[in-house]
Amino acid sequence: MKPTTSRIARSLGDWTWWPPRQPPVAKIDHSIPLFETHSLDAHLLVAAGPIEVVSIAPSPLRPGVVSVPLGGLAIKSSGYTFPQPTLAERVPAMPAAPLPADRRLASPRAAAPPTITRLKPPADVIKLADRLFYVLQPPLETVVAGQALDFPFHPFPYQLEGIAFLYPRYAAILADEMGLGKSMQAITAIRLLLHAGEIRTVLLVCPKPLITNWQREFHLWAPELPLTVIEGERAKRLWQWRQADSPVKMANYELLQRDRAVLAEPGLHFDLVVLDESQRIKNRECMTSQVVRSISRGRNWALTGTPVENSADDLVGIFEFLSPGHLSPTMKPRRMGKLAGDYVLRRTKDRVLTELPPKMFRDADVALTPEQRETYRLAEDEGVLRLTEMGEGATIQHVFELVLRLKQICNFDPATGASAKLERLSADLEEVAASGRKALVFSQWVGTLDKLARRLARYHPLAYHGGVASRKRDGVLQEFKESPKRQVLLISYGVGSLGLNLQFAQYVFLFDRWWNPAVEDQAINRVHRIGAAGPVTVTRFLALATIEERINQILDEKRELFDTIFSDVQPHRHGGLTRQEIFGLFRLKCPSGPLDLAA
Amino acid sequence: MRSRDGQSPPALGFLTIVGHDQHGLFGGYLVLNHNGRPLEFHCTAPVKPNRAQEILYGPTLEPFLYGEQIGRTLVEKSAVEVRLICTDLAPVLALREYVSAPVALVLPPEVVQRASSPSGGPQTQDAAATMAYRVDTAHLRGTLPAAFSLGRNRLAVADGHADDRQCLAAVLESLGGHFDLFEPFARIRGAIDEAQRAAR
């Protein structure tokens, strides 16, 4: 509201005294502003003549003063400084080779997912500065989309979570189901740690057949990192072990045993040791476990789809490498699962890859041919009789030999070559061949695969097993992938169940069953993995009323146990047969003594 | 502060304040390198103005606390000289009077989205409408400064420092335009949360 003349006069009266009954000494001109502010619209006083001012001297006031001290705010602060090395300082870079056209996305960065994946410090990082270092790192999506590092594909969100899990951990098990990209996650975490200067030397240990696969993966996901594969004669290996300018070294488990003296040398240290297929060290007493534990190292990661194959002791064995003493064999499964929780990351395809094509199982229950049945009956009767006569002298090896003999008869009658499974397989392969698709046929025996190769010659099968020279195996896989005539790959569990990417096939036949369903799953997941061309059909052959049926029944029961141990992190839950169970297959009493595991 | 090497890649500072119902205000200052990696982090103990300060500073309390007191303290603690200081809180722009580096207000993505529409702008947003500023010469006067876009970011600078806009453009151009200037504030909040948990 604008002030009126009288209001202004009254307000000015606080400062100017007008004598009574005197004409006004001033008048207000509304047209000319005196001054303006945001809060007051006053007006100019214009003199209408001489201004007569009467001043009085007011008596001095003595106002009381109350002081309100504002004071300065005392602000305390804490500061943290973080290391800042660069790739150029830490890692000698290699020129990156161009990627194959079919491995690149048309627009790799255009389809960045809108997720934010941040590093989270693990529970065993106590110091606040160390925890803040991880909290303050950029989200992984920023790293992937940035220009400092090139990525051939956008990782899936769960893969970024896996990388964020591994990165800050000094002890970790990445236990994703096969086919979810454990290799890629480990390589990317290694790459980021090297670039950040947090580590300088890495040793990756894997089964020998997987060396070339890891080389391919490194070439794809970290092409700038120099990679040294430890191999060759002893003198060359010694030189390679001591080579200082190679940030990533790779070796197979068998080689570690041969070079254990070198690994024990005081000057040889790795900032990170990664064990692929770490179930290899589940037995704490075995030489492989002892050798890897003897390596001087900073961080320890284990990669496995099957952290628990047979019993909870398997996990204890892996933890002896990761964090000795953290778990003990006497712990109850639930307690063990709780203690392992922060160290283990386990995802399954059905939880994270909902877009993966379905995997369909067909249990092909076949009745043995008359020839097989008769041979089987004789072998079983004779074998059981012999074991019974041996009494306490019967060993696990004796029973095992009988089981293997019977399983082989379930495949082929040794005398006549008759095979009910082959008849069924041939019929199924007719359909596969007609569809133009590709199939894998798994067996545990090279002999069985050789017989299949002869009997299935019309499908031009390729073989990939221990009888094929290592140098020729990559060529076999390449031909199987590229040649339309090669529709069948005969493959052994021992060589072919780990690390291969065969997602261009759609059919898997398990001609005989492995002792451990986890190994079967690994075999199946050579096909049913990221990039699978379509639904995967798995046919599991099982000879009715034979040892195969009894083994299958026991293994089904064992699946329950592992759900109990790892209800939270859900590691692989399939186990093999114990010594007692193997004796029980023939209703024989297990002799006393420590239990051995059959798989 | 350490003198800056003219050849080194630019370092950026990010400053924000987190309020806590019981403890008061926590300031956090994060210095990043050109790749977004952390170089330094500084945070304050909780700051809580007393009732008299709240009354007497009135609507100027936030710029005084955020910029002059907390912000200035944090920046002066840093050993790395930065080319640019970013904040997601308008009152922190008051810091500009006490530092040599330009200070930029980074508008959140949702504000950016609305501001880029023909009918909208940061001055018309609810948040902006409720902001108060000091009216003395030390701080902003009156309204939220005009926002402008640089790359993927929408920014504003303090009134009286229009030249900062050119500095910002030069710094962001040297970063290749890929830097998301809003994301680091979430890191600061996470770090302050982590520090609070550690203190309990």
Image: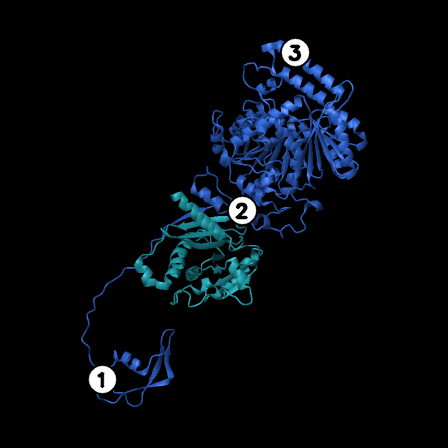
Chain colours: A blue, B cyan
Name the image quarter holding residue A58: bottom left
Task: Say what secondary structure mark 2 lies in.
Answer: loop
Q: Is residue A152 above or below residue B126?
A: above
Please, which chain is the residue tagged with disc 3 on?
A: A
Q: For mark 3, what is the residue?
A: A385
Residue for point 27% across, 87% down: A25
Q: Which mark is residue A54?
A: 1
- Quick one: quadrant of the C terminus of chain A? top right
The foreground one among A83 and B86 is B86
Q: Where residue A165 sits in the image (x, y, percent)?
A: 53, 40
Q: Is residue A404 above or below residue B146?
A: above
Mark toward the start of the polypeptide (2 vs 1):
1
Q: Which mark is residue A574?
A: none
Task: Say what secondary structure mark 3 lies in.
Answer: helix
Let me know if residue A391 appears in the view. yes
Residue for point 55% across, 19% down: A595
Are circles 3 and 1 on residues that touch, CB within 8 Å?
Answer: no
Q: Is residue A139 left or right of residue A452?
A: left
Q: Is residue B29 above or below residue A556?
A: below
Q: Is residue B101 above or below residue A334?
A: below
Please, which chain is the residue tagged with disc 2 on?
A: A
The foreground one among A211 and A12 is A12
Q: Is residue A47 left or right of residue A187?
A: left
Task: Say what secondary structure mark 1 lies in.
Answer: loop
